Image: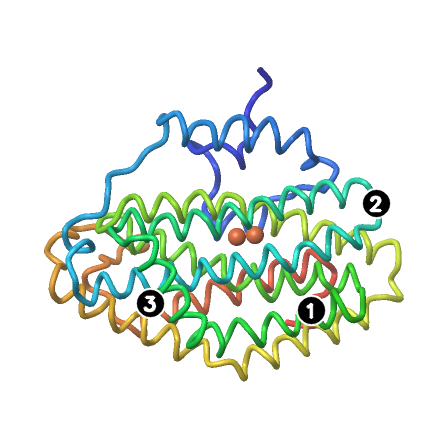
Amino acid sequence: MTRIPVEADWDSAPGVLEGARELELTPGQCDLPYWLEHVAGSMLRRLSDGTVTAAPPTEAVLRPGPLREALVDEFAFRTLAEDKATRALSFLVFHAPDRECLEFYTTQLVDEARHARAFRDHLLVAGMSDREADAAVARTAATSGAAVLDPLEEFGLAVLRDRQDFYGGVLVLTVLVEGILAPAAELSERKWKVLDPSAALVERGANMDEIRHLAVGSAIVRQYLMDRPEARSGLLDLVREGRRLWDELPMQDVLYRRESLFQEGLAEHGHLLGDHEIWPGRRLVDTGIEERMAAAERWSRETQDARLKYMLLDEAS
Ligand code: FE
Ligand code: FE
């Protein structure tokens, strides 16, 4: 068997912050044979055959209380976001300008559908019935989903479905969706690591995929702008328009509520965390709501800026 590429290797894949900013991958490298061999045949195989596993949720998460509510809130939201991403990707497959992009976005579409399933499955692992999991997702859809995800989806669909703009769609997905959500997912992986190792593993697996999506998406836009510099101002406008939209969306409120629940959970169960660090030199148990939100915000800004620069769109940052 050929060597496993680093980004698909559970033991050596970079974290989101590093990988999402620096890794270089092209759609030609990440084609269908690549995905079948290294993602389905290696990364996912190691999950299903039990070579890569994690301990189940601790009692702190299984028992009713704010910590459990924080987990359910987050995983229901992610289920919904991944579901919407899957559907939007069907337009990128449809409008793919060449075989490489067609194959890559077909794999990304399957990745996002897998993520939607993995986040929902975790609600079952955390002890919910199918009916309860669906109810939690429906509740989220009516509240934070309607407030944040629906407008974001409309914005993406205006580009993809209405304007049929493939490269604009890649840009929106890469910078305004994955570039913002991936750093938040990295924070989540670190938050749940001890209290719910199986939740952290779900995040880790999804994050490994997101790094690939970010790297390839930005390589596609970069190549396009090298070939067609005249398209640059239109894409810059799109980034500015998307960032204006983000500024209006109540994402900070959604995160504040979630981190507040997590904070209450820390007060109750923080002793379980020992010296577990959220980042080097900072114990999770000592962190506060605003501090974690500020870190996610900074990581997301830095990730977007690094990717925009790579895409030759750094004036937008
Ligand atoms: Fe995803
Ligand atoms: Fe993704």
The foreground one among 21 and 180 is 180
Task: Please name the residue that numbered disc 1 is placed on.
Answer: 157
- Mark 3 touches mark 1? (CB < 8 Å): no
Q: Position of residue 1 (x, y in %)?
A: 58, 15
Q: Relative to residue 81, is residue 194 drawn left or right?
A: left
- Lower sequence index among marks 3 and 2: 2
Q: How would you rate the neighbour count of disc 3 (Cα within 10 Å): few for under 14, some for 14-19, many for 20 or more?
A: many
Q: Relative to residue 116, is residue 308 drawn left or right?
A: right
- Lower sequence index among marks 1 and 2: 2
Q: Amino acid at mark 1?
A: Leu
The foreground one among 208 and 165 is 165
Q: Residue at x 79, y 51 (%)?
A: 96
- Give the foreground label among 3 and 1: 1
Instruction: Quote the CA–CA distance across marks 1 and 2.
Output: 21 Å
- Lower sequence index among marks 3 and 1: 1
Q: Relative to residue 199, is residue 38 drawn left or right?
A: right
Q: How would you rate the neighbour count of disc 2 (Cα within 10 Å): few for under 14, some for 14-19, many for 20 or more?
A: few
The foreground one among 191 and 99 is 99
Task: Please name the residue that numbered disc 3 is placed on.
Answer: 292
Instruction: Quote the CA–CA distance across marks 3 and 2.
Output: 41 Å
Under 8 Å from ligand 2: the CB of mark 1?
no
- Give the foreground label among 3 and 2: 2
Q: Residue at x 35, y 65 (%)?
A: 136
**Helix or strand or loop: what does disc 2 sit on?**
loop
Q: How would you rate the neighbour count of disc 1 (Cα within 10 Å): few for under 14, some for 14-19, many for 20 or more?
A: some
Q: Position of residue 155 (x, y in %)?
A: 66, 74
- Tell me the quarter of the picture where residue 77 sits: bottom left
Task: Please name the residue that numbered disc 2 is placed on.
Answer: 98
Q: Amino acid at mark 2?
A: Asp
Q: Position of residue 59 (x, y in %)?
A: 14, 51
